[in-house]
Image (cartoon, rainbow, N blue to C red):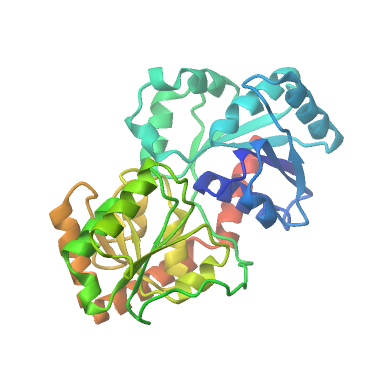
Amino acid sequence: MRIVQIIDSLEIGGAERMAVNYANALGEKIEFSGLIATRSEGEMLNQISKKVSYLFLNKKRKIDFKAIFKLKKYLKQNRVNTIHAHSSSFFTAVLVKLIYPKIKVIWHDHYGPRIEQTKKDNIILIFCSLFFASIFVVNKQLKEWNMKNMKCKNVVFVPNFIQQNHSSEQITELKGIEGKRIVFLANLKTPKNHIVILKSFFDLKLFNLGWSLHLIGKDYHDQYSQVLKDFIQKNNLVNHVHLYGTRKDIRFILSQASIGVLASTFEGFPVTLIEYGESELAVLCTNVGFCSDIIKNEERGLLFDPKNEFELLAQFKRITADKNLRREVAYNLKNLVQDYYTEDKAVEKILKEYYKVK
């Protein structure tokens, strides 16, 4: 089996992380595993295993013939039989299939907000689905949407996972009091909804109880992040809310925290929740996308409607006030992650799906 993952960018993001995770994991399991970045490289480049073949297309425009023929040459030279295209890279995968018909294309839909979109919003994608051998999705809502709207009806739910060979780097020392650190692991962008967590943290005056809030994720230095910084400054939270930007030593960072939060208005399958679970954090989480399947309310964490500020306040107060609750839900979530969302279990499932379209 000779398979390549294809992704438009290697900047840090959910789909990008999964493309790299799949390529690395398959490098240990199949004859040939490759990873192709079409438009831009980024920080995920350094996380690609040495066992993975890598190609950068440096695609300059929507239809770039030079990049497409470069891709075709790479596929033929390495006798690749399947392209696993993540998110928007489906277009490049379909273009190369038109000139190299023997290649199979699997498309992976990571985009949670798609469930609110219409066929008109996805005209090109729906047409291209005529050339897909299979569609992988990251939650049940996306499966329903794809089954209803796409031309390819072979739609399969495939859970995300985290790599087992984590970085052992220990660089980032979190500020604040041990046992009272709250981590929010998400890039500073819509729809991650950081502001509702900031407002709740302030309204509950958690800083007076010794709690601190730590935002880990890429800062795009745009209006979104400026709103967060202005709120922190205006409400004198500079000594209690800390922004760290992009970090590589996530496992070490999480080992210093007690609570992990996620507040998105839309999600596909956030790998962040698996990372929180593996690090045995108590989780306060939005109920969108696949989140409520992972975080069973009261058992593996506390859920809230991201548009209901009163519900968020109540749940935030509970999880910070009850140490026994934190200990119990963190233990249960860690067990779930170990039972269902390890690399081995995910790769076993994905290989079965690959064989079906071989």
Any part of residue 144 in sight? no
Between residues 61 and 226, which one lies in front from this camera angle? 226
Residue at image coords 45%, 51%:
187
Quarter holding residue 320: bottom left
Between residues 11 and 235, which one lies in front from this camera angle? 235
Farthest residue in the right direction? 77
Q: Quarter holding the N terminus? A: top right
* Position above or below: 333 against 111: below
x then y, percent, for residue 236: 25, 64
Residue at image coords 25%, 76%:
325
Residue at image coords 43%, 30%:
146
x then y, percent, for residue 80: 77, 37
* Position above or below: 94 against 248: above
Any part of residue 203 in sight? yes
x then y, percent, for residue 292: 31, 54
Quarter holding residue 49: bottom right
